[in-house]
Every structure is written in structure tokens, then in C-alpha cells.
Image: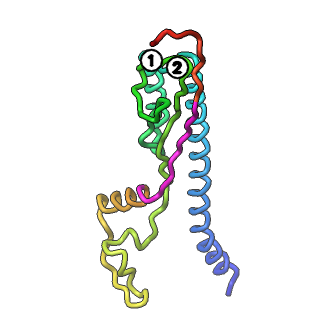
Amino acid sequence: MSDGVKFIFKSLFKVPIIILASYLVFNLFAFALTYFKMLGFSQLLVQTVTENNYIPPRELESLQQYLDKISNTGVVSGAEIVLQGDDASILPADVRRQYGSPVVVGVRARYKFIFPLMPTEQLNDPDTGFEGMEGGSFSGYADDSTLDNRRQEKIDSSNSNIEIVYTVPGLQYYPDLS
């Protein structure tokens, strides 16, 4: 073989590896960035609950706006504030509780890894394959809505939640609630 043909085959072999490595680097970077944003947000929640033993309505509104900005990135969905009382019941954020009772507070979100579709997954019938592949016959390419549904199935099948929850002991100042 000539050197030109060897170079072409080496280049063709490198392309899928480069694509998969790019997806891996992107997913690791996006996950780390999202995780540290959620970690900082959870510390802000802990500080707010420690000071007040609940989340005041005005602060809840601003915290929710900030959480919406974090979850508006395309790789995060379902971001929510977790708030539970000492009896493990889910409480509204703006309900005051007796000082000194522990509160479970944190943040929860679903991270969506970005996966490339394999070439056979872009066909109408992924099981048939391409022409020339061990009895496979070309079934045509799938339309955009089918491809979107397959991408969504891959996203839904990945079980990757970010959940950062702390049990905060409420400071006991004086018995203001009886």
C-alpha cells in the first residue's frame, strides 16, 4: 500500500474515537460544572435554613429563580428544592417551625448525559441494519420525530440524578412557637 492510502485509513479509524472522546469530555465537564453549581446552591439553602429554621417566602422566590437559571442549561431537568421536617414529611418551604428541630434541606436535579446515536439507530428499523451486513437490507432513514424519541429514550434510560441533601439542626433561640 502507498503511504497515502495508509494515511486515509488511519484517519478514518481515528474519527469515531475522536467523536466518542469529545462526547466523553463534554459530559464530564458539563457534569462537574452542574454538580458544583448544585453544591453551591445547596450550601446557600443550608445557610438560609440555619438562620431561619425555614425558608422565608421572599428568599424562596429568589432561590427558585436562581435554581431555574441553573436548570435552564439543556443538560439539567427537574431541578427542585428538597425540604423535609423532623418527621420526614415534605413541608412547604414557607412554614415556620419550632427553633431547635432538625430540617432536611437540599437540592435535587436530573442530569442528562448527551449520547451520540449509532448509525444503525438512525434507520427506520434499527434491527435490519445496512445493505451488505449479514443479510441486512436498507430500510431508509428515520424522520426527525423518531430520532428525537430515540434520543429521549436514551436520556430517560440513563439513571443519573444529582441529589445533595443535608440534615440541618435548627438553632434554638427561644420558644417563639408553641
Which residue corresponds to mark 1? 96
Asked whether, in this view, residue 141 is left or right of residue 45, the answer is left
Residue 145 x, y percent position in the rendering: 29, 58
Residue 4 x, y percent position in the rendering: 66, 78
Residue visible at 46% across and 69% down?
118
Residue visible at 52% across and 32% down?
104
* Amino acid carrying mark 2 in the image: Asn
Label pair 2/1, CB-CB below 8 angstroms: yes
Does dot 1 land on a helix, a strand or a loop?
loop
Which residue corresponds to mark 2? 53
Compare residues 4 and 177 and report the one nearer the observer. 177
Boundaries of the magenta span: 156-167
Magenta-colored stretch includes residue 135: no
Compare residues 62 and 57 and report the one nearer the observer. 57
Residue visible at 57% across and 68% down?
16
Looking at the picture, does residue 112 appear above or below residue 101?
Answer: below
Mark sitting earlier along the chain (2/1): 2
* Amino acid carrying mark 1 in the image: Arg
Residue 143 x, y percent position in the rendering: 29, 63
Q: Which residue of the protein is positioned furthest toward the front in this rendering?
A: 178
Residue 15 visible in the shown view: yes
